[in-house]
Image (spheres, rainbow, N blue to C red):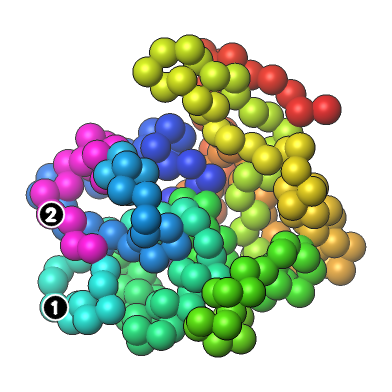
Amino acid sequence: MYLLLCSDFLHIGLNYTKHFFKEKSLTCLFISYALENDESYINANKQALKNSLNIEKFIDLTANYTFNDKIDLIFVNGGNPNLLLERLHKYNQFKRIKELVASGVLYIGESAGAIIAGDYQPHNLFLNIEKDMNLIKHYGNKFYDGFRFLNNFIAPHASKLKVVKLGNEFAREFYKTKSGSNKYSRYLNGIKQLKKHKYKYTTLGNNEVLLVLNNKEIKRTYNWSKFPILEVK
């Protein structure tokens, strides 16, 4: 099994794709169910994949996709993990994705994509993140387990670091941590609850990735010292 899990692919995760492929002309199944309405974000991730892995063809996963193509890797965008899982189940695609990864297809999960790669259920039981009631009303009151490629709950964005705006064309926070919000505080408290209830979990800071190579788990920390870092007190 081959996995690359991260909080942020565009700036951190792409630095680790070299561990997986040497050949060119790759076909990527791209899953943006978790955040479909941000074209600039989606296109930026696609360009980053092209630059780091020489992707020749992107296939956007849609409700009627037939899975007849030869897929080399699967990329799952960040966003809302509940929405992501709901749609994968609604379109009967969850099992097909799991089978592809079990057969050796690389799975790259960013944020929500990283979360559902693990054991997702403790997230719903203990993290106490406010659920989108409109989403539940529309898709049904179901919350599914993740793919369980790993038995641990995967907790991205578990970091006390944030990056200051750079003042150039990337005039925004390098990673927009929500450290000051109640929702983010509940998230970090939820991770403590996982520990209290003795659930297995793996945290991924904003500059960390988790690689799985032939079922061997390797965590790597990216040296982003060239960026101005502030510690969140």
- The type of residue carrying mark 1 is Asn
Tally the marks.
2
The alpha-carbon separation of the residues under discs 2 and 1 comes to 14 Å
Which stretch did the figure color magenta? 45-60
Q: Earlier in the sequence, mark 2 or mark 1?
A: 2
At x 45% / y 62%, what residue is drawn? Answer: 34
At 76% across and 37% down in the image, what residue appears?
Answer: 180
Residue 109 picture location, percent across and down: 44, 55
Circle 2 crowding by C-alpha within 10 Å: few under 14, some 14–19, many from 20:
some
Mark number, residue 68:
1
Task: Please name the residue shown 40% across and 77% down the image.
Answer: 88
**Does 127 appear above or below 162?**
below
Figure check: 157 above or below 127: above
Q: Is residue 31 above or below residue 102?
A: above
Q: Label 1, secondary structure: give it.
A: loop
Could you say where residue 10 lies in the image, as x and y percent from the top left?
39, 37
Q: Quadrant of the C terminus?
A: top right
Q: Say which mark, if any, is on residue 1.
A: none
